[in-house]
Image: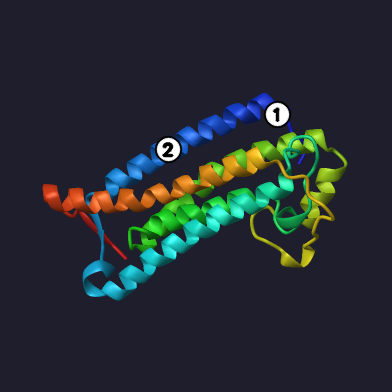
Amino acid sequence: MAPSKSVTRDDLRRLMHKRKQVLVVGIAFGVSLLSVVDTSWRIDWPRTYRAIQWSGLMLILVCIWGRTWCTLYIGGMKRRELVTRGPYSVVRNPLYLFTLLGAAGIGALSGSVAVAVLCTGFAAAVFMFVVRQEERYLLATFPHEYPAYATRVPRLIPRFSTWQDADQLIVRPPLVHRTFLDASLFLMAVPMIAIKALVHDWLKLPVLLHLP
């Protein structure tokens, strides 16, 4: 696990900025691709289609709640102290885990399970690169605490038996508000999917692929 090259806080900031750019481009490409893709559930199994869409909305709401909840435990100290309590006691990257649920929700809003899986896989591929860089930074910053923490707590799959709550929390309202608002942007997928359907019908675009 020893890093071959140290990662600075500025490196992480630049990486986070690039990550957001890649995700925005990916979402834009995905929405444009959906204009010529339809789900086989919509015609043959309309109830299943609607159930998948509602599940997508629920996943997005869980994402918004979860990311906001995680921020309560960070308290603005994530880069100065090793946060190991609350959601960070069961998984090392709970913010990314909830974001993956949000990505799955965006895909499910299309009514397609396949699109939900593709959206989750794309987000996971982007996040895994970021996670590895963050781990290098944390290992260099906390050379004694982080190896033990990484051994005890999984990277992305929760281990609920390791739950440890904090005795008290130092809450930074601006950080919590910003995280909530950022996560709420996932809800923009709802009108985007609706607009996509209207544009598809208005322009009478051909359906090139049916996905389950």
Viewer-nearest residue: 200 or 155 = 200
Is residue 114 rendered to the left or right of residue 46?
right
Name the mark nearer the viewer: 2 or 1: 2
Q: Secondary structure at mark 1?
A: loop
Residue wearing tag 2: 24
Tell me the amino acid under the disc marked 2. Answer: Val
Residue 93 visible? The answer is no
Is residue 89 rendered to the left or right of residue 109?
right
**Label 2: how many residues lie within 10 Å, few (<14), some (14-19) or many (20+)?**
few
Q: Residue at x 67, y 47 (%)?
A: 71
Q: Quadrant of residue 24?
A: top left
Is residue 153 rendered to the left or right of residue 177?
right
Residue 73 visible? The answer is yes
The colour scheme used to paint the residues is: rainbow
Q: In whole angstroms, how far apart are the C-alphas of marks 2 and 1?
A: 25 Å
Q: Secondary structure at mark 2?
A: helix
Q: Residue at x 78, y 63 (%)?
A: 162
Tell me the amino acid under the disc marked 1. Answer: Val
Q: Quadrant of residue 132?
A: top right
Q: Could you say where residue 140 lies in the image, as x and y percent from the top left? A: 79, 33
Q: Which mark is residue 143?
A: none
Q: Quadrant of the N terminus?
A: top right
Q: Could you say where residue 183 lies in the image, as x and y percent from the top left? A: 52, 47
- Marks 2 & 1, CB-CB < 8 Å contact: no
Q: Could you say where residue 90 lies in the image, as x and y percent from the top left? A: 73, 59
Residue wearing tag 1: 7
Mark 2 vs mark 1: which is more N-terminal?
A: 1
